[in-house]
Amino acid sequence: MPTRPEFDLDPRAREVLREIVLQYIDSGEAIGSRTLSKCGKFQLSPASLRNVMSDLEELGFLAQPHTSAGRIPTDRGYRFFINHLMKSRSLSTREREVIDEEVGVASEIDEVLHHASSLLSKLSDQVGLVFMPTLLQFAIRSMDFIGVADSRIMCVIVGTNGVVVNKVIETRFMFTRDELEKIGRYITAEFAGLTLDRIRRRLIRMTEEERAQHDAMMQKTISLGIDAVNAPFEHELYVEGATSILNKPEYSDAASLRKTFLALQEKEKLVDLLEMCLREEGLQILVGSESDFTQVHNFSIVARRYGSGSAPLGMVGIIGPMRMEYARMAPLVDYLSRALSRKIEEEEHHDHG
Amino acid sequence: MPTRPEFDLDPRAREVLREIVLQYIDSGEAIGSRTLSKCGKFQLSPASLRNVMSDLEELGFLAQPHTSAGRIPTDRGYRFFINHLMKSRSLSTREREVIDEEVGVASEIDEVLHHASSLLSKLSDQVGLVFMPTLLQFAIRSMDFIGVADSRIMCVIVGTNGVVVNKVIETRFMFTRDELEKIGRYITAEFAGLTLDRIRRRLIRMTEEERAQHDAMMQKTISLGIDAVNAPFEHELYVEGATSILNKPEYSDAASLRKTFLALQEKEKLVDLLEMCLREEGLQILVGSESDFTQVHNFSIVARRYGSGSAPLGMVGIIGPMRMEYARMAPLVDYLSRALSRKIEEEEHHDHG
DNA sequence: GACTGGCACTCTCTCCACCGGAGTGCCAGT
DNA sequence: ACTGGCACTCCGGTGGAGAGAGTGCCAGTC
């Protein structure tokens, strides 16, 4: 027995597996040998197909819900299908248009990201995900401060990629409007183009250098700058279209609906997962048991990084039951993430020019 | 037959109705004469109670799901209960503490409002609502502008009530950083304390007056000001805790769950409804048929205005099945809305001082 | 040796009949 | 005015029968 049995599945077995996965994705019901025989793709009797299916079950690609039901794919079956058997459907022109328009028209990247999750959800009929992590490798174009109340300052950071982030911070000092403008101008002039992380380190170094000089204004500037950079820019995770799971037969009973909704509520777990995915390049597909979270809830995730090549900004993707149309989801997520990335890179070049 | 039959319900019938509503709210099951007789509050036999119940049914306060079931309250029954029979439970100290802390601790009103809906949802075990309409009667403390890209300016408006609103607007002119600072300072100095609506009208008047003078800077100022005020500050509606309906027996089957989730998704309808409620002062309770939206979905809404007395800022409340603990929901919503209002008024006074 | 038909078996799902429980309305009696 | 009794209705659960779908295995065929 070879170490990687999936690579020497004979062509017929591959075809059978492929057909079972396709039909199961389509119908949601276990596939029996008779059904398979009647579909016309094989010139084999049910009995022969039973033998093939029995082999596939032994290899762990198929499983039976109960003794006398047809077979359904296992996680491993899906995985093999995705890696070796799937033929990605190309996007329809309509889908392409919808995405291009949504991404192209909106002026703010923030806005696009806000909408992207529900767009994705609509197009895929799954739950759309958009994740924007706290990025300390976020290069800034400008930083400004606006007084909101005596000791509360709103800090607005514009990134070189056009993303705008704002956050109210609590400060120790009081600031006049003039001071805030001055500080904003100073920090922007001094640090534009640097990442938040580097700015932070540099400011901290400056604290030490300045301590001797007793320059009150400089102290306030540094203090505010550090506060701004340290302020927890929260992860943002949009989970949109949870209602789409209401239609899925796998969640048709009230109990699993309940479980599933609650699972999608647990954003921390999803954030952890997406943060891990963020390290990898290219389209990623996680099936069931391939992560703790997806295993527990029988989810699959199709996601891809977006952002300029050098500095990924976040993840877009979909989450849904393991039985999903991978062949359609893959290009969809892929295309959207590329469209977003293109938009972001345009923004950056626009900035340099 | 009197025009308002509910006012001359004899005391015994009132007590029976009250008991039926209470028990039905508690159990969710239709109440029969036997159950009622056994509860001990009436020294009557089931047969006598049947007569009373039959009367109440004729008057439209009770209904039978089917011939041989007990009775459940109708919309009208709930209404009578709420108006004349309900004894509001006072909040537990724990509930009071949780609300006080949540409202007191958070520094930003925005933040409080963000959290208020999920707080309310948790405390009530219903769906929490927080609505913040576009308010043209929004008095400002300051207005500032920050360049985000060449023709895109982020406008940050701080209200006298401490609410911070920000929005990116598309402009016709290009602005330097200096110009933006100048404009912000000018508008803040000139218009602080006025409502957005008055600012808009004044700016429009100024357009006409200035047209002759050819002051480029002034033109840009007015143009940007008008853009900022006209920019659609969207209604914000937070609908939190939709998962709480998963537990309610009235939505236990998949079909009604589906309908209910989709209904809560239709935010426009909810916004319309809450906007209407905004006109009324004090705690409002809408039961089933009392509005189109609640009728279709068998919802009830308990909501109350918040904001300073003179200028209501929005609505907080809960939405859930008609069978809800009105006696607990009413004081809960009431207390939260008062806490929010207090917070907002503090903020305003703090500003004047 | 690969494929096929046949057969006995298993498991689920649906339909239907049945019955108990709960509740009602009505009536006669106190 | 209230009560007990009685016949009736309707819901919900239970249990068995039977159909349908699928399997495994075996013996037979090319």
Image: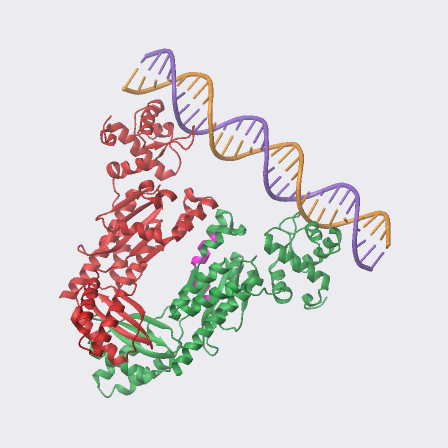
Chain colours: A green, B red, C purple, D orange
Bounds of the magenta segment = A259-272
Whether residue A38 is situated above or below residue B19 in the rendered picture:
below
Residue located 40% across and 48% down the image: B245
Whole-percent x and y of residue A120? 47, 62
Whether residue B156 is situated above or below residue A57 in the rendered picture:
below
Whole-percent x and y of residue B57? 33, 29
User: Is A175 one of the magenta-colored residues?
Assistant: no
The reply, left or right, for residue B31 in relation to residue A337 is left
Q: Quadrant of residue A117?
A: bottom left
Residue located 35% across and 28% down the image: B38
Whether residue B24 is situated above or below residue A170 in the rendered picture:
above
Whole-percent x and y of residue A41? 71, 57
User: Is A267 one of the magenta-colored residues?
Assistant: yes
Res. B21 in view: yes
Whole-percent x and y of residue B328? 29, 45
Q: Quadrant of residue A350?
A: bottom left
